[in-house]
Image (cartoon, rainbow, N blue to C red):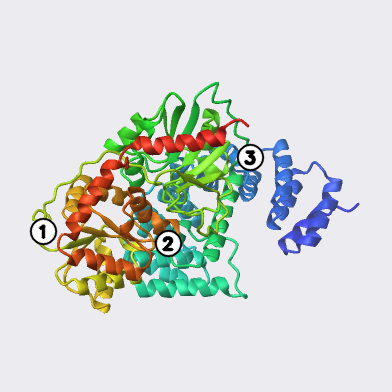
Amino acid sequence: MPDRSSDARRLHAAADFAAAETAYLDALASHPQDTELQHDYAVLLMQTRREEQAITWFERTLAVRASIDSSLALLLCLRATGRIAQARVIAATLVERVPGHAMAWLLKGSLDVIAGAHAAAEPALRRCVQLDPRLGEAWHYLGEALQALQRWQEAIQAYRVSMHYQPAEIFNIALCSERAGLWHEALEGYRRMLRMYPDRANVMVRLAQAEAMCCLFEEEAGTMTRLHQRLTSSSFALAADDHPEAFPLAYLPLANTLRADLLRRHAASIAQRASNHASRRAARRSCSAALRRLRIGYLSADFGEHPVGELIQGVFAAHDRAIVEVYGYSLRSHEGDISRRIRDGMDHFRNLESMPSTGIADLIRHDAPNVLIDLGGYTQGARPEVLALRPAPIQLGWLGFIHGHQAPWLDGLLLDEWMQPASAPWPYEDRVLHLSTTVFPGCPQSPGRMDRKRFGLPKDVPLLASFNTSYKLDEELMRAWVSILQQTPSAWLLICVPEYARVGFLHNWRRFGGPEHLLFGDKLPRAEQADRAASCDLFLDAFRYQVGATAVSSLAAGLPILTRTGDTPLSRSGTSLNCYLGMHELVCADTASYVAKAIQLATKPGALSALRLRLDRALARTDLFNPRRSAADVEAICQRLTRTP
């Protein structure tokens, strides 16, 4: 039989892959131990996207002789097929053998990033670009690592280098600019990206989020109209890698069916990433509560100065230790009083910031909690892929992402009867578990002291306020506020939106004919904010995304909250608190009644004072600020879910 190896390589070089494969197989039949032939044939398999077959041939080659090229190609195939754990072991060995090989460092760093080991990835990728600064892929993965470590400016610098090789990096630059609070830079970046890729849903969602943050109501509406048109077009299909971020979907205006589909798509991409990390091992079923205490684990990136941390800080210590053992899994390091209170309230606290997702899942699986409660959902810093790896037999979502998740790894979402009434539509696949009280936990808080002079607030006038951040506001809400002030000429409105949103806010305020009785306030430390809230008369809640942690602290300061109930959990959070307190008169069914109620309270002498007295009595007869309330609620649900049949 003639030697076909030369023919195979010639055909391979000419990209005649079918003919080359036949020639390779003929040659290998005659020379089955020829490792160079094995390597070349494996490369052909890799080039034709048959990585699983290529892996077998590369491993066969490497079993006979060490080869840098075969090792690198094997790592590329393992990365492409999601065999990340195996690839990381090989990559760690390879960089020890060839410490001066840039590609080896690139593969090690990229595999660390994919595994979620971002702190380990950074030095590997910096070594790579030091050896060969022209490797654009290395700059991209370095940007990913720095972004995950929340070093936004450094990430932007890395992405800018990578952008010389891949213009689409402008999207990542915009995202890091957003995280760094550089919203106008983020806006420009998303707009540039959308000009390059006009059909990308993920870019449209991010752009709409940035427009919402800057109170650009008309621009946001235009972007969302464009998104709706794309998603409902019969000739349009999302690209395979187009996964819009979930958090903005919870409040941006979009049909529920479209929102549910996009959330399902987002969850599927997370599940795929999780399956790439490692094979899932079943979580151990715990033994009966009669034999030991119920183990409840809490997973969060926000065990510190964050709205979730502020709300839940007292719950862990409030659990009944006769029946519960508490585990805390922290995805981000925090300092300060809140973080110390949270750590002290747990039986076991794990700081897992630098650990990859698979390692976190394995550690949780080893601890064997009966129930794992995720407090992050799809918010910044959360790691839903840990939940997707199924480290616990029962997994629940609570507090961080108050919305449908479409997450097959969750066995239930903890909501309440006002935030998601049993009779209300629920277009999501997640199972709703109703708490017996409001979804928001509380802890003892100082009531605040009224002092308008200290904050530069006008004396002897009805002072209305909103402490909602800018992206929670929308055109309908602003028109309602304008109507309220136009009909209560003595009233003033205090708004606390960030500096970057004020130009957009004022543009729309004047466009709608808003009066001059408008004040802007900056963010304050908690104690000072309590005093400022106590100095106001009525909190005007937002519509599409209502107040949460700020509502609890405002109520503690004696500030009543006027709400308009909506059709999503986030648009009913103020409703939840008012109904729990029995302040039903502050829950309005529509915008017209919201406006009318605000005018009534602001114009009738003594109405606001009487309302504050009613609120004081409601707070006195309920346990809104008692963390044991929520701890007992969670215990009851966990016991019910883990009860042996």
For the residues marked 1 and 3, what is the alpha-carbon distance in whole angstroms? 60 Å
Q: Which residue is mark 3?
A: 279
- Which of 235/146 is in front? 235
Task: Please identify the quarter of the rendering in which residue 122 is found.
Answer: top left
Residue 378, relative to residue 488: is it above or below?
A: above
Residue 516 visible (yes or no): yes
Q: Which residue is mark 1?
A: 456
Task: Please identify the quarter of the rendering in which residue 487 is found.
Answer: bottom left
Asked if disc 1 and disc 3 are in contact, CB closer than 8 Å, the reply is no
Q: Residue at x 80, y 53 (%)?
A: 24
In the rendered image, the residue lying farthest to the right is 1
> Which circle's residue, 3 or 2, is located before the other in the chain?
2
- Which of 480/143 is in front? 480
Residue 144, relative to residue 84: is it above or below?
A: below
Residue 327, relative to residue 593: is it above or below?
A: above
In the rendered image, the residue lying farthest to the top is 291
Q: Which residue is mark 2?
A: 251
> Which circle's residue, 1 or 3, is located before the other in the chain?
3
Q: Nearer the viewer, mark 1 or mark 3?
A: 1
**Which class describes the residues within 10 Å of circle 2: few (<14), some (14-19), or many (20+)?**
many
Asked if disc 3 and disc 2 are in contact, CB closer than 8 Å, the reply is no
